[in-house]
Image: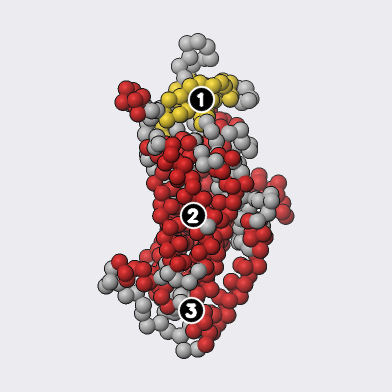
Amino acid sequence: MEWWTDVLTAEDYEVGRQIVQRGVAAVYLVAFLSAVAQFPALLGEKGLLPVPAFLERAGGRACPSLFHRRYSDRLLLAVAWAGTAVSALLVVGLPQAGPPWVPLVAFLVIWWLYTSIVNVGQTFYGFGWESLLLEAGFLVAFLGSDEVAPPFLVLLMIRYLVFRLEFGAGMIKMRGDRSWRDLTALYYHHETQPMPNPASRFFHLLPKPLHRIEVAGNHVTQLAVPFLLFAPQPVAGFAALVMILTQGWLVVSGNFAWLNTLTIILAFAAVPDSFYAAVIPTVDPAGSYQPTPLWFTIVVVLAMLLLAYLSRQALANLFARHQLMNASFNRWHLGNAYGAFGSVTKVRYEVIVEGTVDEVGPGARWLEYEFKGKPGDPSRMPRQFAPYHLRLDWMMWFLALGSERGWFTPFLVKLLQADPLILKLLRKDPFDGARPRYVRARIFLYRFSTRAEKRATGLWWIREPQGVLVHPASLRAEVS
């Protein structure tokens, strides 16, 4: 065995490598399928924010993308389906069965394909977990194949990514909303989070002392535990398990796309094989590895040095007075700054979109468009969608907070046109594909029903009208 194999490999992390490789590939699979289903309606040639118009405005300043020179919906679908196919192969482990260059190329292919999508995705792809997925995919590309032992440097850099993700989230909370510091944030968060799930109401109704314990536990997990990822085993492994447990709590209590799922997957890079053997004694993942090729070791070292260099700004950002949240410092989305919910919304507003086939007046019958994930019908139980990302529903949450970014007026126009691509993104079109005469948008204050209210009415939500965001408008007049 060569000296570089002794220093740079970690033979006791085979299970962790399998979980990380296949898990990250599975998230890419979900992301590409999301693009197939949603991108043409949101960003396609006839979408709400068409990519061709965006590229024309950006000109030479456009970020790297396969679509930089030419975009078409057909090309987008070809890219997304190709990414889906390669991701599926990685999930089942076929490329990993070959020499180390095969999964290296496969992961770099899906990283580049998804980078091409994100870089033209505008506000609909402006989420921190997009950059997290890209950085994770690039990193995991260098984990090698089943033929060679897992590279220790890559596992270490994955832990560093988890550290930046968790510690960044902890610091942005401490620097942000006072409710995180006085331990009251979860008095509100389960109810006001972007997209509650079936268990969110249960968590919201827990006793307030328990909410304070939750927040305190979150601070410990995000501000102290991440440093232990770099400690010797078994400390690093137990630190990872603590993070996996707390991230699982977030999966159960909300819909945050693949943010929590991907964090859980990456944390397994710090869990050694001995942990699995302690639970299931028959587990013996260690195999007879072939010597790691010198070329692969050189590539791994150079790639990790590059990532360390690119992440220097993100590291400094963790300790900066004016910390940035979910920021990319380069066009490749490598070495990013992360963080979530630096501020907590205390009340929940929802924008409810309605249409009518009648003339506007006291007798007009307005019918409500229903979204798949965002709260609407007060009697409807919230659904679980994560790790799938409902992009339109998330943007409706931001809209209720006052952030529109140019997509909502085109959305209302599409409803007036009964655009089939947009209507497919909704749970219910009250007009069954026919065109309404008018649409409008009203604002409601939402809160979870109490236990007594739920027993009496069967409602999950109690809502009160707060005003009008968009007055009745039709295609005959400008929507305003």
* The disc label shown at residue 309, or none: none
Which residue does the numbered mark 1 point to in the structure image?
444
Q: Nearer the viewer, mark 2 or mark 1?
A: 2
Q: Residue at x 64, y 60 (%)?
A: 315
Q: Residue at x 67, y 59 (%)?
A: 316
Say which amino acid is labelled 3. Thr
* The disc label shown at residue 9, or none: 3
Instruction: Tell me the crowding category of disc 2: few under 14, some 14 to 19, or many 20 or more residues within 10 angstroms, Cα based.
Output: many
Label 3, label 1: how far apart the Cα atoms are: 57 Å
* Residue 15 x, y percent position in the rendering: 38, 69
* Residue 261 x, y percent position in the rendering: 44, 54
Give the quarter of the figure containing the C terminus.
top right
Badge 2 or badge 1: first in the primary sequence: 2
Label 2, label 1: how far apart the Cα atoms are: 35 Å
Q: Residue at x 30, y 66 (%)?
A: 279
Residue found at the far bottom of this picture: 1
Whether residue 451 is visible: yes
Label 3, label 2: how far apart the Cα atoms are: 28 Å
Q: Are marks 2 and 1 in contact (CB under 8 Å)?
A: no
Say which amino acid is labelled 1. Phe
Q: Residue at x 62, y 22 (%)?
A: 477
Badge 3 or badge 1: first in the primary sequence: 3
Residue found at the far top of this picture: 362
Which residue does the numbered mark 2 point to in the structure image?
221
Dot 1 lies on which element?
strand
Residue found at the far right of this picture: 60
Q: Is residue 318 left or right of residue 186?
A: right
Corner quadrant of residue 88? bottom left
Residue toward you, 231 or 198: 231
Badge 3 or badge 2: first in the primary sequence: 3
Dot 3 lies on which element?
loop
